[in-house]
Image (spheres, rainbow, N blue to C red):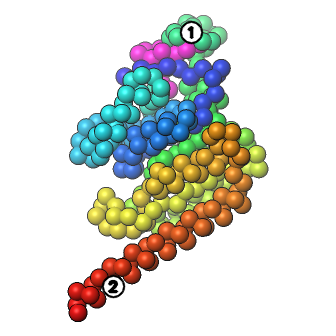
Amino acid sequence: MSSFVYPSSKTPIDILLGCTGSIASVKLPCLSLHLHSLGYTHSIVLTKSASFFIDEEHEGSARVYDEERYLKWRELVDEGKVQVYRGDDEWNCLRGEGVRCGGKGSVSVCEGEKTKKNFTCPVLHITLRSTHRLLLLAPLSANSLSKYALGLCDDTLSSLVRAWEVTKKSAVICPAMNTDMWEHPVTGKRLIELKGFWSKGSECVIVQPAVKMLACGTEGRGAMAEIDDVVKVVNGLLPRGGGKRETRGERIKRMVVEAARKKFEERKEVSVIMGAERSDDV
């Protein structure tokens, strides 16, 4: 059972980082460290599947992926600079077992008696929704994408997404899955549905997955976008250092320019390789 500090409504937190069960979850410590280095306060909510990559130690775990950054990230968590919530914390909080619920600035367990009609206890996903300014889902797996688009809510993160103030607070979504799953018609359909929940007072930005060698051993589109690219989008919606929020038009223009630059660099690299091969043939 996990132990956490219940969020205080007096101190708004910049980002709610939701992590789902894609193998790209191993990048979570690196993303969290990057956000922290830029001054973003943030909390993390893991699904049960994501916890498999973060909490356990095996060949596919976050610790094995990058042990140095993983240990630095654990220091942030252990020092209380980043709070981590898990799928069953919603129920643990209601039980008042093994959790620390801060009520009105104090640190205490849920108060009340189950025999009384007025029994009350803080509702974790509602408090998380209220205390965070931006929702960042990175990575977002194919399974969780479908759940959130359909409005299903059976754990802390899915309940939080369902309760998110879509008319007031923006979101950044970073899909990550196998190429075949990414190209399946249902993926595009669910992304459109999920993005469509946000309205004029807020925005939902989908950060396209990258083309890479995937965990399944094939190369294709489906890898979670590079951390730098994710953070650029976050910074556009939630600027650091008093910067001006990036408009939708400015962001689209920037992303088009960056995509063109990357494509040019890839072509240039291919030309260099082909040139070297021709030299070898001679």
In the image, 98 versus 59, the foreground residue is: 59
Q: What residue sits right under mark 2 in the picture?
A: 275
Q: Mark 1 or mark 2, which has the lower sequence index?
A: 1
Residue at position x 66%, y 64% from top? Answer: 253
Tell whether 26 sits left or right of 59: right
Tell whether 10 sits left or right of 262: right
Residue at position x 45%, y 22% from top? Answer: 80
Where is the N terminus found, in terms of image quarters? top left
User: Residue 74 location, x and y as percent?
Assistant: 36, 30
Q: Is mark 1 on a helix, strand or loop?
A: loop
Residue 143 appearing in the image = no
**Residue 106 bears which disc, if any?**
1
Is residue 158 within the magenta segment? no
Is residue 99 within the magenta segment? yes
User: Residue 116 location, x and y as percent?
Assistant: 60, 7
Crowding at mark 2 (Cα within 10 Å: few <14, some 14-19, many 20+): few
Amino acid type, mark 2: Gly
Q: What element carries label 2?
A: helix
In the image, 255 versus 88, the foreground residue is: 255
Amino acid type, mark 1: Ser
**Residue 71 bears which disc, if any?**
none
Tell whether 23 sits left or right of 5: left
Q: In this view, does 14 lie above or below 2?
A: below
